[in-house]
Image (cartoon, rainbow, N blue to C red):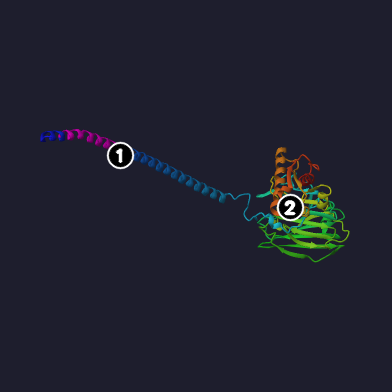
Amino acid sequence: MKTPVLALLSAALLVSCSFPAQAQFGGLKDAARKAKDAMKKKDAEAQAQKDAEAKKEAEAKEAQAKKEAEAKKEAEAKDGAQAKKEPSSEAPAGAAAAPSFQVYSKFDFVPGEKIIAFEDFSQDAIGDFPGKWNTNGSGEIVTISGKPGRWLKLAANGFYTPEFITALPDDFTLELDILSPPTFKNGYALQTVLAELPSPTGNSELLQWTGAPNFFQFVADPEAGSEGSVQVILRQASVSTPASTRSTKQFTKVANPVHVSLWRQRQRMRVYLNEEKLFDLPRALAPGSKLNTLLFALRNDAGESDFCVSNLRLAVGAPDTRNKLLTEGKWVTHGILFDVNSDRVKPESYGALKEIVNVLTENADVKVQVVGHTDADGDDAKNLDLSKRRAASVRGLLAKEFAIAEARMETDGKGESQPIDKNDNPAGKANNRRVEFIKR
């Protein structure tokens, strides 16, 4: 048994031995806590710095976006002011919008197979009267803002005639564009006359055209308001018939130019303004009548009835689409028209397109190659590219508008490399501008 003194010494020794261990453990714990707190503080500072940088970047982006928006707004304001100051030549004030392709869904006009006369005045100088025309009035070649090409402005009372047209066969199609400016003052209408005269180039006969034994007279009056009017006047075997009149929205002071299409099949005459068929007269012409003259007659007092004409196309031969494609293996058409230097198909091409559609629809196993051709004007490489793009546009229209499967149609373009006529005159160039459908 231990004595009290030894017990006290033992207890004191135990106590003195335990204090250093506890102190060491507590110090380590404090150090770990302090290290952890320091780490948290460092992380917090890093996150705060990161957040500050992100905020600064966001503010910079917002400032840049605001600056760009203000610049865009300022540019648009300038463009708007410039547009008001200088109206676009693409769409002059009062000009009618281009018609959509679907507008022509009932258009059944099909141009003749071969072009025998074509006039776009490209060979004449601006300001001159065209060299291959005759008149007892006055006129000049002009350009018109927003309208492609050149136009013959009929500027005085009298007749105007293309002397290169000396025969109008029993079967032909005649197309032309007629335009009157928005300043037109309801003067007198433009008369388009197909006549049988003793001499198609004699001034005395031209002056007396109203006494011709046979003529077909188409009268176009743009008028004001929402409608114009057209008339047909017939003369057979020296006997005139009363005028037939129609109102039309196709040709007013602002809804023009108008594309006129005349179609003769022996005695029958059909008249179209744009997509609208206005007359279909089965006995319009006397049997055996020999039309040989095209003339425009105008009364234009004080310059109040100016008219312009252009893009005259006279073609012969009814297209035999089915036989040409299925039997001969190729159908060539000049009736698919395009904007100048463009692959955009004009809506008045609808009738010609419908011809090939009918054959392809009725012969579902037939495949074709669509081939574009141009005249020789311009750069060879550009013409080749244009012809390829035009062929592709035709295929696209046949697929989109007529549901002909694109898999049935290949496309190609030959540019100016395969002419079928001379390239030294307007009619020859017009014949070379064509689309071919080749059976595969």
Circle number at residue 349: 2
**Distance CA(mark 1)–CA(mark 2):** 84 Å
- Dividing the picture into quarters, in which one does residue 44 lie? top left
Quadrant for the C terminus, please. Answer: top right
Q: Which amino acid, by three-letter code, is at mark 2?
A: Ser
Q: Residue 284 location in percent, x, y?
A: 82, 62
Front in this rendered view, residue 102 or 359: 359
32 lies left or right of 312? left
Q: How many neighbours does mark 2 have within 10 angstroms: few (below 14), some (14-19), or many (20 or more)?
A: many
Quadrant for the N terminus, please. Answer: top left
**What is the span of residues highlighted in magenta in the rendered image?**
12-35
Q: Residue 185 location in percent, x, y?
A: 67, 59
Q: Which residue in the rendered view is the most extreme toward the right?
A: 288
Q: Nearer the viewer, mark 1 or mark 2?
A: 1
Disc 1 secondary structure class: helix
Q: Which amino acid, by three-letter code, is at mark 1?
A: Asp
172 lies left or right of 381? right
Circle number at residue 37: 1
Question: Most prominent secondary structure in the magenta stretch?
Answer: helix
Q: Which residue in the rendered view is the most extreme toward the bottom?
A: 242
Is 217 situated above or below 113? below
